[in-house]
Structures are given as structure tokens and as C-alpha cells.
Image: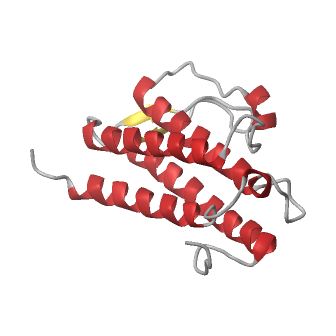
Amino acid sequence: MAIDQEREDLIAMLAEQRELFKITLRGLDEEQARKRTTSSELTLGGLLHHLNNCERHWTKVIIERDEHAALDVTTFGGEYVMAPEETVAGLIAAWDEAAAATAELIRSVDSLDTSIPTPTNPWVEGQVWQSVRTTFLHILREISQHAGHADIIREELDGQNSTYSRVS
């Protein structure tokens, strides 16, 4: 089977953004991962928890293509919170598993152009359909956006970020 360059480029871009985000986690202990350093409620561990959920959610949307799915907003309360039993290492391992599954899905999905339904939600009226490509790009956007948040949080924590890290 010939390599589909667009798919491989998408996989590479997702991997690159995940790695940039992970740089902000280097050398952190669990207490630091849970520490708020800005006026927002965001923490590095909470962002990692969210990105794990986000990637799994959107790949499930691609696989299931459920026209009747609705977003359960009652689960949002803990979306950006690193639970007491979670660890940075455990969340990274889980995200690595999700990343591998995403790469496999990108390589195996029938077409990036296929239009799929997204779960209904309270802030958009009616059913929204988008391409599989757009859904993967949404995952990329989430990771990229939160990598920026992570940089700011880490800088406030100890002066390090994804471009300057004294910790190996």
C-alpha cells in the first residue's frame, strides 16, 4: 500500500505538538502538576487530563459516526482536573496509547473527506457535520492551543517552558 503523504503529515504534526506539550511536563512532580500558577483554574496536570480525554473523544466520534450522539456537559466539571489517583506518568502513558490509536485511525480511515456528524451540544443549534480531516485538525488545534497554555503555566511555576528547559 502506498503511503498517503497527507495522512503521514497529519500524524507527524500531531506527534510534534504532543511532544512540545510534553516538554512542559519534564521534571514535574505530582504536586507541581496540580499547582495553579495563573489566575485561571488551569494546571499542567489538568491540561494533560483534558488532552487525553479530547483525543479519545474525537477519535470515538470518527469511529462511531453516531447521528444521535449528544455531548454530556455534566462531565465538564472535572475535565481540566488531574484526579487524585492520576499521575503525570500515568496520564502520559495513556496519552501515548491514544496517540498510537489516532495514528492507526488516520492511516486506516476510509477517507479524510468523509463527512461525519458531531455530537450535538448546547452552544450550537442543530446537527453539525464535518469532514474526518477537520476532526483530526480539531485535535491538532486543541493540543496546540493548550501547549501555549502549558508554556505560560510552566513559566510561572519555575521559569521553564517548551523552548527553554533546564530539566532533561
Question: In the shown orientation, is residue 5 left or right of residue 59?
Answer: left
Who is closer to the viewer here, 68 or 165?
Answer: 165
- Quadrant for the C terminus in the image: bottom right
Regarding residue 147, the answer to whether it shows in the image is yes
Residue at screen point 75% across, 45% down: 80
Q: How far across and how far down the image is residue 13, in percent?
A: 40, 62
Q: How many marks?
A: 0
Q: Is residue 111 left or right of residue 152?
A: left
Outermost residue on the right side: it is: 39
147 is higher (above) or lower (below) than 83: below
- What residue sits 52% from the left and 36% below the top? 56
Figure coloring: secondary structure
Residue, x 20% and y 52% (percent of image)? 4
The quarter of the displayed image where residue 128 is located: top right
Q: Residue at x 43, y 45 (%)?
A: 99
Position of residue 127 relative to residue 7, above or below, is: above
Q: Is residue 108 left or right of residue 10?
A: left
The N terminus lies in which quarter of the figure?
A: top left
Residue sitting at the far top: 68
Query: Residue 27 occupies which quadrant of the picture?
Result: bottom right
Q: Could you tell me residue 2's position as x and y percent?
A: 10, 50
Q: Residue 153: x percent and y percent?
A: 76, 66
Q: Is residue 113 visible?
A: no
